[in-house]
Image (cartoon, rainbow, N blue to C red):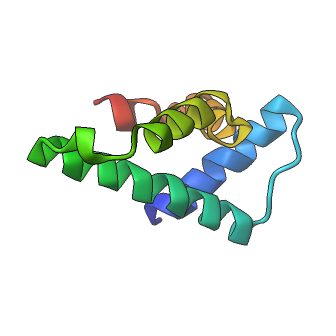
């Protein structure tokens, strides 16, 4: 199972536990790719020591969005429910 497929499964489980309506697979993948692209941008910037070159307003907006986004919260709840948290925490 690919990473986005596994994440969609966690997301659906999390939505069920949180009693929230999940977005469809297409919408999920669009949101997933957006977060993934920003995470990759940060990872590359950290590796090259250029994090300060990323627009600070964009970084803060994404930080706040990630902190309060029910989309990500549902994924995390789904991971906990399936015992998959160790996959990202090592």
Q: Nearer the viewer, residue 61 or 67?
A: 61
Q: Nearer the viewer, residue 25 or 50?
A: 50
As displayed, is residue 83 above or below residue 12? above
Can you give x and y, in whole percent of width and height, for residue 1 in the image? 47, 65
Name the residue: 13% across, 45% down. 47
Please tell me whether residue 32 is drawn above or below residue 68 in the rendered image: below
Q: Position of residue 45 (x, y in %)?
A: 21, 48
Most distant residue in the left direction: 48
Left or right, 12 with reference to 87: right
Instruction: State the image quarter where residue 14 is shown.
Output: top right
Q: How many marks?
A: 0
Q: Quadrant of residue 51?
A: top left
Q: Residue furthest bottom?
A: 26
Does residue 32 lie above or below 49 as drawn?
below
Q: In the image, residue 16 lies at what x, y percent?
A: 82, 39
User: Which residue is located at x 49 percent, y 33 percent?
Assistant: 60
Residue at point 88% right, 47% down? Answer: 21
The quadrant in which the C terminus is found is top left
**Residue at the image point whose x is 53% and y is 59% from the top:** 34
Residue 4 in the image: above or below residue 66? below
x and y, in percent, of residue 48 in the image: 10, 48
Instruction: Tell me which corner region of the image, top left, top right, bottom left or bottom right, holds residue 49.
Output: top left
């Amino acid at each position: 199972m690919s990473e986005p497929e596994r994440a969609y499964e966690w997301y659906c489980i999390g939505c069920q536990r949180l009693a929230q309506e999940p977005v469809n697979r297409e919408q999920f993948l669009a949101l997933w790719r957006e977060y993934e692209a920003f995470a990759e941008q940060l990872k590359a910037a950290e590796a090259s020591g250029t994090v300060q070159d990323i627009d600070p307003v964009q970084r803060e907006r994404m930080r706040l969005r990630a902190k309060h986004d029910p989309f990500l919260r549902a994924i995390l709840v789904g991971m906990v429910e399936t015992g998959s948290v160790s996959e990202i925490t090592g």
